[in-house]
Amino acid sequence: MKQWKECTKEELSAMRAEFASQYEALKEKGLKLDLSRGKPSSDVLDLSNALLDKLDSWRTEDGTDIRNYGVVDGLPECKRLFSDLTGVAPERMIVGGNSSLTHMYNTMALFYLFGASDEPGCAPWGKAEKVRWLCPVPGYDRHFSVTQDMGAELVPVPMEEDGPDMDEVERFAGPDPAVKGIWIVPLYSNPTGAVISEEKAKRLASMKTAAPDFRIFWDNAYGVHHVWEAHKAPDIFALCDAAGNPERAVYFFSTSKVNFPGAGVGLVAAGPATVKRMLAHLKMETIGFDKTTQLRTVKFFGGSAENVRVHMAKIAALLRPRFDLVLETLDREFTGTGILEWTAPKGGYFVSVDTLDGCAGAVVARAKEAGVTLTGAGATWPYGKDPRDRNIRIAPTYPGVDELAQTLELFAVCVKLVTVEKLLESA
């Protein structure tokens, strides 16, 4: 297939007429589809319906009445289940709330209000003249929003196939005490699906930082969300401990995309001193999280990490045809054209695509006009501004396969139409 950049103006004009006609025909279908967020589909949610009927007792294994106050740090049997699943020691965990995002926000707020450490040179971040935070890009928009809401300056660093560009990370964090941390999605990162390598995780854990209270916010959101083959994230706590930085990592996980997003369980884990610090302030915030959901979750999975893995394999079987459809469509429509690049993740919830520079915003707008909502162009960059205006996150998990096929057909036409118009501008 001829590369589009090699086409003549006459060829491009003919292509534009063809794609414009296809686009108008698709607009007439009156589509109303949404690929903007990585939400579970109804058939995936149906796998967890029995969760609602799992409470045959109000008592935990040690006799605690889950209907009452108490157990701020989470039920022991829930911690044990998560420990078996993630490899994180129970004593490092605080379990509670349905969202790991809440734990991220609370942790950031804690560090801003009271500091991340009592060590010398570790004043509350909110009292610092400036706080800078490293953001691998393309990345997760909600991560960026949390940090931005606190007033931090967001600093993009390139995301590579095996994690962030560590030379850039060290270039920023090494000499600048204002650089307080970095966001990391270690497994199937949002949106590229990258898996961080052991080498890069070790560099994060051991690198010299000007800030003594530098923190890695390790959001293992997709730690059990394998679609084709299972990968394992490096043990960030073991790496930090070995490097003499036991408090550097703060780990997040939840069951929001394991069973019900609105009725899941989130956890935060950290070094011993940080957990102690968190609990001291958490006790001012709550007398106890929702223990009924914690116990229901334990009972649904029979307290077994292996049962969670079996459950996730069922989810993967439902998601795989959707991801296959995305990748097959992109390959069929764009291989050889030179106008689109995309990732082929092994798990997670997204596929990341890069248009030619200056085209992503127009593609999203064209799709919206025709009835398909995509994640906003720029959402995968700090402040919502992709400097090259090229990255788009595709979230194929929510619609059914038939709806997804219609959406991808429109997406392909929008990319072609916008791209050929862009090439005509300089032809």
Image (cartoon, helix red, strand yellow):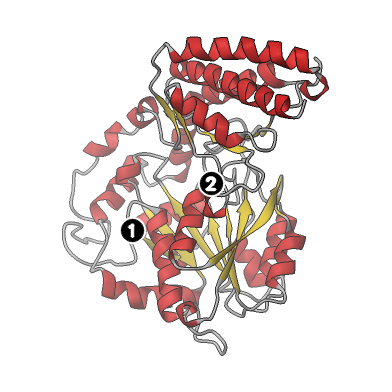
Q: Residue at x 70, y 63 (%)?
A: 169
**x, y percentage for residue 143?**
50, 55
Mark 1: few/some/many CA within 10 Å (<14, 14-19, 20+)? many
Residue 91 in sight: no
Q: Quadrant of the N terminus?
A: top right
**x, y percentage for residue 417?**
62, 21
Locate residue 46 relative to residue 274 in the image: left or right. left
Rendered position, 408 above or below 95: above
Residue at the farthest bottom position: 120
Task: Give the secondary structure at mark 1.
Answer: loop
Q: Residue at x 25, y 68 (%)?
A: 286
Q: Residue at x 44, y 75 (%)?
A: 112
- Residue kind at label 1, given as amino acid type: Gly
Where residue 9 sits, quadrant-wise, is: top right
Where residue 358 sits, quadrant-wise, is: top right
Rendered position, 203 above or below 226: below
Locate residue 172 relative to residue 47 in the image: left or right. right
Kindly identify which residue carries mark 1. 96
Task: Give the secondary structure at mark 2.
Answer: loop
Q: Residue at x 77, y 21 (%)?
A: 4
- Residue kind at label 2, given as amino acid type: Gly
Q: Which mark is residue 223?
A: 2
